[in-house]
Image (cartoon, helix red, strand yellow):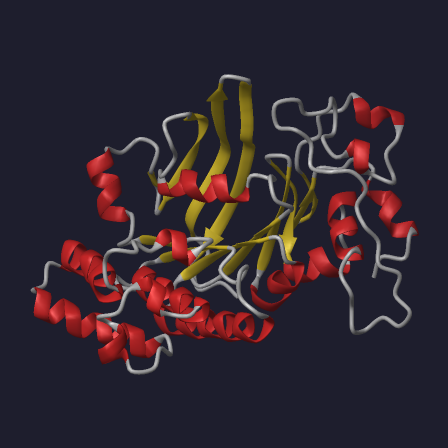
Amino acid sequence: MYVSREPILQVKNLKTYFYTEDGVIKAVDGVSFELYKGETLGIVGESGSGKSVTSLTIMRLLDEKAKIESGEILFKGKDLLKISEEEMRKIRGNDIAMIFQEPMVALNPVYTIGDQIMEAIILHQKVKESEARKIAIDLLRKVGIPEPEKRVDQYPHQLSGGMRQRAMIAMALSCRPQILIADEPTTALDVTIQAQILELMKELQREYGMALIMITHDMGVIAETADRVAVMYAGRVVEYGTVDEIFKNPKHPYTYALLSSIPRLDVEDQELKSIPGTVPDPLNFPSGCRFHPRCEFAREECKNLDPKLFEVSPSHYTACPFYGVLENVGVK
């Protein structure tokens, strides 16, 4: 699975808060994980769990209301939170690139697809415009866009949703990054195009040897792409392990609930469950375990505990001290 035993990225106890007129939103509240060269880390959870804010914090693309309260983001040993914005610009897009959630919003409507890809190439690779254009056309061809010599001069609105997403991938890969962060890369696409985009990303990952962070709410996407998984809820990682451990032997009731809400081909007469309630208001998190108001296994102690991740096995961590209850409910 791993090309290297040394992590290329380490996120340690990261806290990103938003200061609003209504109060402090603890969007990311003590998140930690590691990413190794050549692997895919899936970050999964419902909307509002802090997945996207985690990725934007890594890229240092937060708005003025946000403040990184504490933590470390170590890229090849260098803390990205301690370097200057000028140094960060050299890393952003060049060493660490990102595919944003909605390509129609992320792409600038008044510039051609080619201009937007070429901008990063010229900035980071220091090549002439004519050479950058050739590279842009080659990238569009590589990501499966037909007639790339024509598409390079078109505007985002002239491309379909699937082609816009492919253009975003081409843009992200323009400088052969060591890490690619994909934030819900298939959300607005139909099922057939989703499968094509995921397969394309896996092919490009193998070719480029890059590490990939796949951010999604879709457990099916995680099963298809990830090597390891971080399950997030209410700003925290509640379970962390290999994809096999997470799917076959979940150790947190939230993970179990997510898995119970999706259909499985290997189970006949499966009863799909829904998770009661909604993700808590980040301005007013419940006391104790933040999942306890929605947890079918909650007990009185859960209202007062402040659970942290702890090791279940050398590669598997959970934030539920009562995870043993899952062994009695038929989780396979």
Pick the front one: 83 or 232: 232
| Quadrant placement of the C terminus | bottom right
Q: Is residue 58 left or right of residue 21?
A: left
Q: Quadrant of residue 165?
A: bottom left
Please give the name of the residue rendered at 24% of the width and 62% of the height, measured from the top-left corner.
117
Residue 57 lies, with reference to residue 218, above or below; the image says above
State how many labels appear.
0
Residue 195 lies, with reference to residue 24, above or below; the image says below
Percent from the top left, x then y, of residue 220? 65, 64
Please give the name of the residue rendered at 36% of the width and 62% of the height, measured from the top-left corner.
168
Pick the front one: 45 or 248: 45
Residue 278 lies, with reference to residue 115, above or below; the image says above
Percent from the top left, x then y, of residue 44? 61, 50
Pick the front one: 76 or 328: 328
Please give the name of the residue rendered at 10% of the width and 63% of the height, measured from the top-left corner.
127
Furthest toward the bottom, the residue is 147
Percent from the top left, x then y, of residue 58? 40, 41
Percent from the top left, x then y, of residue 136? 22, 70
Pick the front one: 193 or 311: 193
